[in-house]
Amino acid sequence: MTGQTVATTHQSHAIPNTRIVSPSLRNTKKSVSSLSKRSQTSPPENPTSKPSNQQASSLALGRLANYNEELAEAVRFYKKAASFVLRAVSKHSPELAQSVVDSGALNALVTCLEEFDPGVKESAAWALGYIARHNGDLAQAVVDAGAIPLLVLCVQEPELSLRRIAASALSDVSKHSPELAQSVVDANTIPFIAPLLGNPDAKLRRQVCSALSQISKHTVDLAETVVDGEIFPNVLNCLKDSDGYVKKNSATLICEIAKHTPELAQLIVNSGGIAAVVDYVTDARGNARLPGIMTLGYIAAFSETLALAVILAKGVPPLAQALVTETEEHIKAACAWSLGQIGRHSPDHAKILADNAVLPKLLKVLTSTSNPTAAPNNALEDDKDVGSDLKTKTKRALKCILEKTLYLDALEPLLQPSTPFNVLKYVVGQFAKILPNDVAARRAFVTSGGLQRVQEIAAGLGSATGPNAGQINILNGTKMGEFIRTINECYPEEIVRYYSPGYSATLLEKIDEYSRKHDQASTEQPPKVSVVAENNPVTPSVAV
Amino acid sequence: MAASFARIKQLNYSDVIDEFFNKSWAAEVARHKEYNSDVKLQAKIRGYMVRLHIKQMKGAALKIQRVFRGYKGRERAKAERARINHEALLAFWNKMTVKIQKIWKGYWSRKAKFDYYARKKYLADVVVKMEELRIKVSEHAKEQEIIAKTKQAEFEANLIEKLSGQRHHLVGTKAIPGVMSKAKQPLLSKKVEYQQDVAEEMLQETKILRLPPLSKLPEQRLKESGELKAWVQATVGTNHRNVKVKAPAITFSLVDDQKQAQGPFLPKTLLEVKRGRPLRPTLRVETDFYDTYNFWKERREKEVNTRISDKNFITTKHVRHPQSGYFLGGGPYTLRQTSKKGDSLPKPTAPKFKNVLAPVPLFDDMMDLLES
């Protein structure tokens, strides 16, 4: 074995224990195999439902953990089997893992990590990872047992499977809290695992990407430490990996780094990383797309230049495509958010979004999720619906983009009575900002029928609330009313009246009234001629 | 005097008395007159004197006031002049300050906050960098793909080699007639048969070709495949003289004087017997199953015996970077080379002079760049 000298020292340590449990020791091999079978056959959904099972396992574990060293010195494969048992038990729930920890298995597992046999190390690292993945307390217990430096040593071993499992255990430990991640970083992990991003083994790359992203997600300092590990050209290569999980994990890593500060986002932009992220978003489908989409949003949110860089990386078309084609709501919401972040900086940004037909797509998403019969008054109640997150995100994105859009051709299609009120007010608001200052736009607005639609909208809103409330028109005192008034003030009164709905009825009424007057006065002049003459000044000016 | 007075009193007492009274009366009147005139005179003089005094005082007061007011006025005027001067100066200074601030702010913001040309250049550089990265990443992906393909090909080649090693008896001339077998046939019949043979061969070839590559077929399916059985029946089972060289795969007989089928075509019972036999590899490749393990053991023992110290030591080195925020240095618009060998991008130099009068619209440029 490992040399008789070592074995004897261990025996001398374990003397008091051997005496007490020596009869039970003979049966340990049996119990190990039976235990492992039992824990495998127990239903993974609810393993705690069998208390007898749980108790027996923990009891056996306690014994195993106590005499593990001795056992393993006797027969080395026991260590592997025992770690396997620990792993199988602790994988199911935090309670089981806690009972494993309570029985003192951690120290035994950590000593297993110091073993020479890579198989033993591997199974111990695996078990430690399974214990740590449940919650922060368990992970803290693993850290307190001093496993991290040994796991880092394991990552440097030549055996691939050991490296994979050690990296995954590090990821499981660091995912819970900034303190745990810091303790992982303090063991000088980053310089060893960061170069593994270029490793030819795909599964190792997966785990390394995951570990790095779990470390960098917590704080700016941690993210900067990860970036200092020279991950950059490699992680971008990983975005176009042959393995799907490597792609997803590396996208998550980039997302976790980009979200912290403008400097980190700029670092990604400077290294040309957005192009890779955009390609990733274009290629990926479903949930894997999400980190890429979020990365683009985070980067674009920081500054106007970075948003422009996202646009130049051709990031808008894939986002718009994802917005349409993806079926899950949270991905759509992320797309909407990212697009909003890109478009909210300046009219130029908004124009590019409008050129990619993002606005109608967003509007379609918004209207397809909301209840079509809902009146504008019920907007608040609708927010509590199932798709409320997607709805609010889409609405905010539309607001951000619309408030910067000065491109009338993009705004025109949204100016419809069917558009929801909470979006319509920003569209009308943009027209109210542009029209008073732009003569050509004013003329185009009339010829394209925009003014007529504004009047229809105004009439629709007025009538929608009029009978219900029986009070003053909704347009009095609201922003929408002010916007419509501002637009109407840009035109002569006759034109506004000509385009307001129901004008033909009022005209007919006028004709009737006029003819009645004429009949009463019994004049010889035919009434129609005079009506035409009276209306002449109004109509030709409009018709031009 | 008293005697004269008495004599006079005796002589003309009454006259004297009268005269005395008259004269004293007159004197009294005159005295009154004089007194009144004196009073008048005095009043006049005093009035004059007082008026004169008042006049003098007034004049003096006026003089004092005039002088004092003049003094005050001059003083105020001086102050006012100073104020106006100061205000004008202040206004001038303010104007100049604003001018300086304006120029400085313009310079500073162009230099550090929003440098239009630097931004434009930065964005162009980013686009170039992105294109470079796209190429690099796709190259890397291609390399990876090639490596994966070669690995797969190697694996398949190994598999085929292994299979061919196992099934080499199927392709021997014992099983399939060789070229020389035709030579033994009579010439006449050969001509007639030639065409048939070719047709048959082609048929068989197509049949074989229709099968997927052997490496892809699972062993079990290969054994149970009807096509293969038929092929074996047709070609392997008989030779060119239609003599059976081997029992067909389906009808294995245990007791036969014919040559036994080999490899996977053994009857099941024999196969199981064969499988149950202990592995006795040839001397050439004799290795124990536990060889590696024993080697580790030996090595370990040797290592433990020759070990000088039991202390663990770590052979890793701590990587140090020049600064913690080294990637942040060099202002907001400088590119950092992240790849190690990348020397394709030129070093950032001082911005070139550009004509400010006709700035080119950024977005149109960018869109041109994108389209091109």
Image (tube, helix red, strand yellow):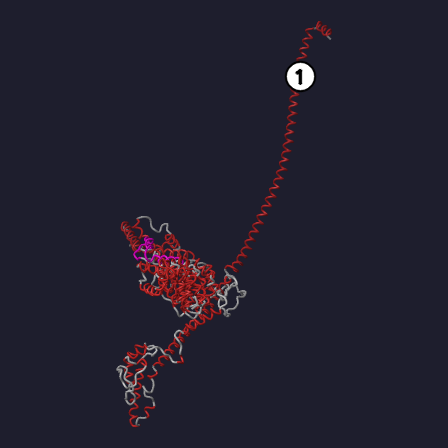
Give residue A349's quadrant in the image. bottom left
Location of residue A67 with respect to B226 vertically, above or below: above
Residue A445 or A25: which is nearer the viewer? A25
Q: Is residue A456 left or right of residue B136?
A: left
Q: Is residue B60 left or right of residue A85?
A: right
Q: What kind of element bears circle 1?
A: helix
What chain is tagged by disc 1?
A: B
The magenta region covers A371-400
**Any part of residue A73 in sight:** yes
Residue A395 or A389: which is nearer the viewer? A389
Residue B93: percent from left, percent from top: 57, 51
Residue A395 or A274: which is nearer the viewer? A274
**Any part of residue A446 in sight:** no
The N terminus of chain A lies in which quarter of the figure? bottom left
The residue furthest top is: B10
The residue furthest front is: A19
Residue A191: percent from left, percent from top: 47, 65
At x 54%, y 57%, the residue is: B104
Callout 1: 10 Å neighbours few (<14), some, many (20+)? few
Location of residue B352 with respect to A532 vertically, above or below: below
Give residue A458's quadrant in the image. bottom left
**Does the magenta segment cover residue B275?**
no
Residue A528: percent from left, percent from top: 29, 55
Residue on which disc 1 sits: B31
Instruction: Report the predominant secondary structure element of the magenta stretch.
Output: helix
Location of residue A485 with respect to B147 vertically, above or below: above
The kind of residue on which mark 1 rests is: Arg
